[in-house]
Image (cartoon, rainbow, N blue to C red):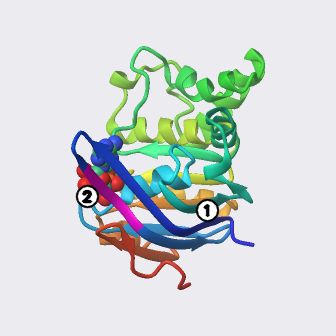
Amino acid sequence: MALIQLDAVIKTYEMGETTVKALRGTDLTIDEGEFIAIMGPSGSGKSTLMNMIGALDKPTDGNVTVEDQDIGELTRSELAVLRSRIVGFVFQQFNLISTMTAMENVALPMLFRGVSRKERHDRAKKLLDRVELGDRYTHTPQELSGGQQQRVSIARALANDPDIVLADEPTGNLDTDTGDRVMDLLTELNEDGKTIIMVTHDPHDAEYADRIVEIQDGVIKNGDES
Ligand SMILES: Nc1ncnc2c1ncn2[C@@H]1O[C@H](COP(=O)(O)OP(=O)(O)O)[C@@H](O)[C@H]1O
Ligand SMILES: [Mg+2]
């Protein structure tokens, strides 16, 4: 049984009078432990696809199944539980909270899951150590470089020990060396058993993946090949 399965997924956005077809019949199968790179032109539906896989949004038609759960059948609160339990997100813009320290940012997803204060802090420290920011616990995002901020956001993505890490252009705002460090970290997580799904424009980054999925105009061209 696949970890993630998309069958004939259609996603449309209503924009006043017009309808935008972001995904138009997308099929994709992802097995546990894969490291996937999703590539395609701007506007081709990559982020929309990530939102479906990450249970951030429901399909307009078709089926999305994540760990045996049919996303379309879940309520908003069930989707939130699924997300916080099994998915970690990494974004191009880091999306850290600017008024919080690195540790507080990493601890935040645990707060939403009711983890005790002590355990939140212990675990946040461990995760920051893991991404080699053990000397930056109390720094705020503006006191960190872009690469460091992205590593904080990877630590935050790991807060609830997810099975799946979704990274949408994680190196898009980083220089090559800093980006390579982020890619090495994603590779290590994959070696530890996490399923990694990454959107990238960069063929060099895509080489870190086991498999490249190409999307164009909301249709995946090679979703069921391995
Ligand atoms: N929330 C939204 N509302 C309306 N249109 C959207 C929304 N999100 C994405 N779109 C449109 O859907 C299409 C696919 O967008 P997106 O998934 O962001 O593509 P990509 O990540 O590949 O650049 C684009 O035409 C985009 O303008
Ligand atoms: Mg995008």
Residue identifier under label 1 = 190
Task: Please give the count of numbered marks on the rendered protein.
Answer: 2
Q: Which secondary structure, mark 1?
A: helix
Give me the disc on residue 26.
none
Q: Is residue 221 above or below residue 129?
A: below
Residue drawn at (25%, 58%) of the image: 43
The answer to whether residue 113 is seen in the rendering is: yes
Query: Disc 1 beta carbon < 8 A from ligand 2?
Result: no
Residue drawn at (29%, 63%) of the image: 44
Magenta stretch: give its range: 19-24
Please identify the quadrant where the N terminus is shown: bottom right
Other residues around mark 2 within 10 Å, as few (<14) / some (14–19) / many (≥20) = few
Residue drawn at (61%, 51%) of the image: 72
Mark 2 and mark 1 lie on one chain; the one further toward the N terminus is: 2
> In this orientation, which residue lies closer to the viewer: 80 or 19?
19
Q: Quadrant of residue 14?
A: top left
Other residues around mark 1 within 10 Å, as few (<14) / some (14–19) / many (≥20) = many
Q: CA distance from mark 2 to mark 1?
A: 28 Å
Residue drawn at (62%, 54%) of the image: 164
Q: Position of residue 29 (x, y in %)?
A: 59, 73
